[in-house]
Amino acid sequence: MQIAQILQLYPLQLIESSSPRLDVEILLMHALGKNRFFIYAWGEYELKPFEITKFKELFKERLRGKPIAYLIGKREFWSMPFLVNEHTLIPRPETELLVEVALNHLPKNGIVFDMGTGSGCIALAIKKERPDCQVIGVDNSLNSLNIAKQNAHNLNLEIEWIESDWFSKIEIKADIIVSNPPYIAINDRHLMQGDVRFEPQSALVSGKDGLDDLFYLIDKSRDFLNPNGWLFLEHGFDQGFVINSLLKTACYTNINTYQDSNGQERVSGGRFPFV
Ligand code: GLN
């Protein structure tokens, strides 16, 4: 079978995917160990039997709905490659907003906590831009910390990783706390569709309205922020208002909500004053 034939036939089967052609291209590149240029330039290339087997294995999993990022074991975030697997959430482009907002508030030589760091993408993006800062990535899953550590190694960035259930093992304070915590309601229909079906529930679901962990972080971060330190949280598109009120009730100041590139409210945060 030739590359051109695969590109013609296989996308037709991926009826559930929103990007069938792209999916097949990526799986083909992965199976062949080649870049997109090769795929486009060598349509008449005849796949070797082991390459066909490899491609078909990947394709079968994709037909089952498995996310492309898990099939090829990586995803780009902040223009850097990140290893991912079933233990980590797949980095989303909208989460780059959280990095941007944090960078805009980060003091020189500041200390940053990334709570629930997963693949480490937020912590590593911040460290990449601000090597002067001390960035600490926290997660309660040793499996995701192992991926985060490999990512730090591959990107040649230094982060301190702490295995901890939220703040339970944290003994210092930060100038900025960021988090993309689980924020989906347990009975949200969205959990039965697309990539999220294959992602760790512990990174997605947070109680009956999706607010349990956001609420916890707003409350608890106050004990772990230096005076006038900032907390920034990613949340669902419809949670901005309630997160604002929770921040207000918890006595944060300078509260703001930020919209992602789709115009959805995606990040909120504020400053905890010296008391
Ligand atoms: N943004 C993700 C989604 O809606 C959820 C990520 C999260 O819960 N932190 O698929």
Image (spheres, helix red, strand yellow):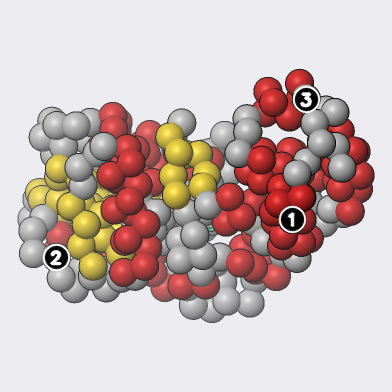
Image quadrant in which you'd find residue 28: top right
Residue corresponding to mark 2? 170
Q: As drawn, is 275 to the left or to the right of 124? A: left
Q: What's the distance in space between the residues labelled 3 and 1, CA to CA?
A: 19 Å
Image vertical order of residue 36 relative to residue 259, above or below: above
For the point 67% across and 61% down, the residue is: 66
Residue corresponding to mark 3? 42
Disc 1 on helix, strand or loop? helix
Q: Residue furthest front?
A: 49
Q: What's the distance in space between the residues labelled 2 and 1, CA to CA?
A: 48 Å
Disc 3 on helix, strand or loop? loop
Q: Are marks 2 and 1 in contact (CB under 8 Å)?
A: no
For the point 33% across and 41% down, the residue is: 154
| Percent position of residue 248, x then y | 32, 56
**Near-viewer residue (125 or 80):** 80
- Label 3 vs 1, first from the N-terminus: 3
Q: Quadrant of the N terminus?
A: top right
Q: Quadrant of ligand 1?
A: bottom right
Residue corresponding to mark 1? 53
Residue type at tag 1 = Thr
Label 2: how many residues lie within 10 Å, few (<14), some (14-19) or many (20+)? some
Q: As drawn, is 56 to the left or to the right of 267? A: right
For the point 63% across and 43% down, the residue is: 30
Q: Are marks 3 and 1 in contact (CB under 8 Å)?
A: no
On residue 142, which mark appears? none
- Label 3 vs 2, first from the N-terminus: 3
Label 3: how many residues lie within 10 Å, few (<14), some (14-19) or many (20+)? few
For the point 46% across and 31% down, the residue is: 79
User: Can you tell which of label 3 and label 2 is closer to the viewer?
Assistant: 3
Disc 2 on helix, strand or loop? loop
Q: What's the distance in space between the residues labelled 3 and 2, CA to CA?
A: 54 Å
Res 192 visible: yes
